[in-house]
Image: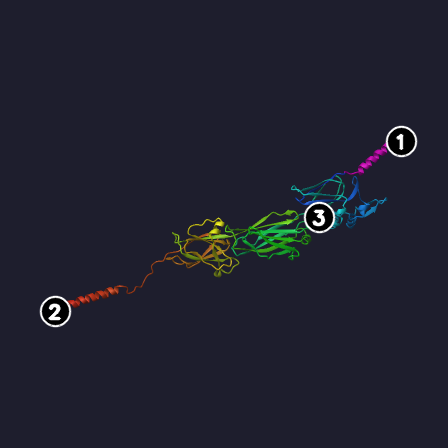
Amino acid sequence: MKLGKKILSLVLVALVLTVGMNFTAFAATIEVDGAYENETYNAYKLLDYTSNNDSYSYFLSDAAYNSALGTALKDAGFKFTQSADGTQWFVNNSDELTDGAAIADKLSKSIDTWKDAALATASTTGTADKKALFNDLPTGYWFVTSSLGSLCTLQTYDDEELVVEKNTTIIDTKEVSDNEVQVGDTVTYTVTLTDGKGTNLEGKVNDTMSKGLTYNDDAVCVANGKTLVKDTDYTVTKTTEADGKTKVVYVFSADVMTELQEGEQIVITYTATVNADASLDGTEQNVEFSEYSEQETNKKTIEVVLEKLKINKTDGTNALKGAQFELYRTDATSVPAANHTRVPVRVLSDEELAAANITKEADTVYYEVEKDGTNYTIDMTNASSAVVYSLDKDSTYYLRETKAPDGYNLLENEIEVHLNETNSIDVVNNSGSILPSTGGIGTTIFYIVGGALVLGAVVVIIARRRVRTNKK
């Protein structure tokens, strides 16, 4: 009797140990490493399981097997065997299911059809420390998705597991063809988006230009060597903001982003023209950043710079008023210097100077380059200095005097100006001398003739007196 009780006790202990070995914890944790801040991470339970050391048995209830979830799993390559009592369906080809990425891809593409039939669900959000944590999950075979992209994770969780975010976001760069310009110049901007892993959502590029830049509506977008079609592959929206800036937004469709592979690029090329609203402080800015899902790239500011030239008119010592000039320009892309281009200018008002925080100097006139203008004269009739704004620092300019101050000789030759060397020049005029003369009859002849007449009259008078004396 005692022996029978001992045997029964051993059987019960063995049963308890067996049950304990097959029983897994009911509070599992999933931690996503490398998570992106503000992105949404969802977890879907696909299968139940039991485990014994390194042995696992995955299954679905009969109801789950016959749901959309069961259909999706079978389409993804899972095969099942029904239990003897018909209540469960066990995975029977786990050794064949070696390509987790391919399974995850298939499940991701059909997720909208089966996610509501998942055995359990959970959701969390990425934090600033690049973590996303799921707590108190029931044990099972889980499918984890990210709002960032299409790459997903399949894992068996019975305690605490760490997975890594496989998706990456886009990165961007921006360049300008020339950052030293004159009003009227057109510059070319290039924005390059480089695709990340799993990107299957629309991508957006935001580009804001300062008031002195005019967007030319000529963007060309090329994805991996293929020219994209506007309003089909992407859209462009242009708005003018309250401060006069122009905001241009390019949105590339999810289809375009999905088709790109990691490392492939979208290149956006467009032009902008420096207009009459260019700031007199010499800087026009263009700010760009990209958006993908909840992520934004760092803002990139591209500047184009405009220079000024001060002309001082002197005789070498003293300031002179009364001159007039014209300004000509040539650079590497313009006509030869012998036929360089005349630069149109306009007078800046006191209000414009004040708005630009420019303090007027005495005896100075202020001009700005004017695109398509008709006035070419820098008039210093009442000034000894002139300042011309909105010039190109890397161009060569020529200053031609068209009128000299009264009493001074007109300069015969143009003055070559390189603004990358100086932005202030002294223009010296020399005064004229009294020119030599070959002479004329002047008044001398009249003195001679008058003297001769007087002398003749004296002779006549004397002669008459002698005649009278002799007669007596």
Q: Which residue is mark 3?
A: 151
Tell me the magenta residue range. Answer: 1-25
* Residue 222: quarter of image: bottom right
Label 3 environment density (alpha carbons within 10 Å; few <14, some 14–19, many ≥20): many
According to the picture, the residue beneath numbered tag 1 turns out to be 4
Q: Amino acid at mark 3?
A: Leu
Q: Reading the chain from its start, which is encountered first: label 1 or label 3? A: 1
Q: Residue furthest bottom?
A: 471
How packed mark 1 is, by other alpha carbons closer than 10 Å (few <14, some 14-19, many 20 or more), is few
* Mark closer to the observer (1, 2): 2
Q: Position of residue 108 (x, y in %)?
A: 73, 49
Judged from the image, the secondary structure of the residue bearing numbered disc 1 is: helix
Mark 1 vs mark 2, CA separation in Å: 204 Å
Residue 82 colored in magenta in the image: no
| Distance in Å between CA atoms under marks 1 and 3 | 59 Å
- Which residue is at the front of the view, 95 or 324? 324
Q: Are marks 2 and 3 in contact (CB under 8 Å)?
A: no
**Residue 468: image tag:** 2
Say if residue 91 shows up in the picture: no
Query: Which badge, 2 or 3, is on the more N-terminal residue?
Result: 3
Residue toward you, 129 or 196 = 129
Disc 1 residue type?
Answer: Gly
Identify the colour scheme used. Answer: rainbow
* Magenta segment includes 9: yes
Residue 235 coordinates in the image, percent (x, y): 64, 55
Report whether 142 appears left or right of 301: right
Q: Is residue 376 left or right of residue 272?
A: left
Amino acid on which the number 2 mark rests in the picture: Arg
Taking the spot 83% from the left edge, 33% from the top edge, the residue there is: 13
Residue 116 position, x and y percent, is: 75, 47
